[in-house]
Image (cartoon, rainbow, N blue to C red):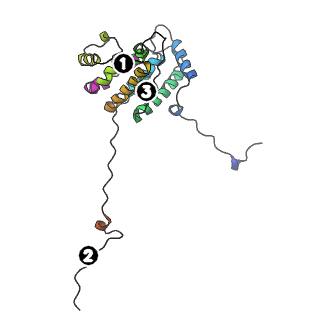
Amino acid sequence: MATPPSRRVAAPAPAPAAAAGPLSEAELDALQALLDSLPDTLEPLDVVMIDGYLCGVLLQPQPVPAERWLAHIADVDGRAPPKRFDVARMSALVQRRHAELDRAIGRRQWFDPWVYQLDDEATPGETVLPWVAGFATALDTFTGLMDRHEAAIVEPLATLYRFLDPDDLEDADELLAEIETLAPPESLAEAVEDLVRSVLLIADVSRPQPAPRPAAPRRPAAATGGPGARRPRGPSRPR
């Protein structure tokens, strides 16, 4: 039986993609399968690199338009994928992760990087290297962060870039000197913690949080003539 018009309830509007929540394991697998379907002529990021790349995008001093950073997911050089490729599906999945990371970084909250143990023989540095490579790809593609704040982020940047080949760090003497002072992480958990901590430290420089506004001082009630205030008595009139 149809619901009487007086009792009909409007269906809720669909939630936007940004509020859809973290990607499930099945969705992560679907995203990687999409990227694996691209032709060999392109060089797509994998899901681990995408995660580091998105952090590098989000740390830029000025927001990067989605159409610009999305262009480098299916190919690191921004070449267009074939028409048969499901760009919409890829974009929807990646933008959900972008929104999730944006919220975490903006609130200075912990997030779980997309880092996976390669094998029992892999060192912590080798395991997080693809994530760091994605991060470095973002900073090479969008140069605002380094152009404005390179000197202020040497320490957290060195914590990330110590996993890269030193030969890939050209004209970076100060960064290399800082890297030489750092010990390698003793565990994968420590390496992952270093990723998150470094991202949030860089955010303090490139995306500073507004300082809380101090509360306005309140005047004493007697000074304002408010309730309970006593007025001074003038001289008595002679009778």
Secondary structure, mark 3, is: helix
Q: Nearer the viewer, residue 177 or 93?
A: 177
Identify residue type, mark 1.
Answer: Ala
Identify residue type, mark 3.
Answer: Ala
The percent position of residue 16, horizontal first and vertical second, equals: 53, 34
**Residues at marks 3 and 2, CA–CA distance in whole angstroms:** 67 Å
Q: Nearer the viewer, residue 160 or 59?
A: 160
Taking the spot 27% from the left edge, 27% from the top edge, the residue there is: 152
Query: What mark, if any, has residue 178 been given in the picture?
Result: none
**Residues at marks 2 and 1, CA–CA distance in whole angstroms:** 72 Å
Query: What mark, if any, has residue 136 been given in the picture?
Result: 1
Q: Is residue 172 above or below residue 215?
A: above
Taking the spot 23% from the left edge, 85% from the top edge, the residue there is: 236
Disc 1 crowd, CA 10 A, few/some/many (<14, 14-19, 20+) = many
Residue corresponding to mark 3: 66
Is 57 left, or right, of 232 in this rendering?
A: right
Q: Where on the picture, by quarter, is residue 128?
A: top left
